Image: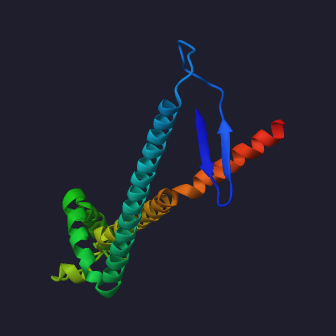
Amino acid sequence: MIITVQDDLQEIRIKIMYEFDDNNEPETESAKSSARSLNETSQDVLSIVVRMCGLLLLFIGLWIAIQVFSEALALYKDPATIERMAIAIETGSNIDKSIVPLRESLLGEDENGVQIEQTTDNNATTFRISYFIAWVVDLLLLLLLARIAIMAVKTGGELALYDAQVKKLARHILNAKNKLH
């Protein structure tokens, strides 16, 4: 088996002495060249597939990053849109309703033991913890998506620049070979 790595000006051949030949007959030159060309063709096809997957992953990561940025900008421009998530959190957990008895017990009497009147407008006076939880959850989700986008862009870029890693591996192999001799 011959592993070939092409650098800019030189061709480096590392021969590995390992043969799977049961009958110990030498192969013909045409069989060797056809096997070599098939091997090179499959490596080229694999390289193209890896690069295309890398570019696809790179563009998906960029699209996710743009969507995260636009959602964060939309929340900055109109913070009232968080209300949907706050309602969903309240519906699922009933956290605001569980705080109401605690609030009433704390605000029910003043220092002299006289009952304090409750206002009829509950939306203006109630403290909605689900609203603040919705902000925390939304920001954490945006940060998670941003992190996923960064990892997708990084991995896609590494896959698209496939040759750089192969050249680095070849240099390490040559350095290891030179140290042995």
**Location of residue 78 in the rendering, given as x and y in whole percent from the top left corner:** 28, 85
Q: Is residue 115 visible?
A: no
* Observer-nearest of 151 and 174: 174
Q: Compared to 45, does 105 lie above or below?
A: below
In this view, the residue farthest toward the bottom is 77
* Observer-nearest of 52 and 90: 52
**Location of residue 173 in the rendering, given as x and y in whole percent from the top left corner:** 70, 43
> Toward which corner of the image does residue 96 lie, by quadrant?
bottom left
Residue appearing at x 27%, y 61% in the figure: 95
The quadrant of the image that shows the N terminus is top right
In this view, the residue farthest toward the left is 120
The quadrant of the image that shows the C terminus is top right
Give the left or right position of residue 139, taking residue 120 as reference.
right
In this view, the residue farthest toward the front is 29
Label count reads: 0
**Location of residue 27 in the rendering, given as x and y in whole percent from the top left corner:** 53, 24
Query: Coloured how?
Result: rainbow
* Observer-nearest of 115 and 85: 85
Give the left or right position of residue 150, taking residue 102 as reference.
right
Residue appearing at x 59%, y 54% in the figure: 165
Give the left or right position of residue 84, taking residue 174 as reference.
left
Q: Compared to 107, does 94 lie above or below?
A: above
Q: Is residue 128 visible?
A: yes
* Observer-nearest of 103 and 76: 76
**Location of residue 40 in the rendering, given as x and y in whole percent from the top left corner:** 48, 44
Residue appearing at x 33%, y 79% in the figure: 70
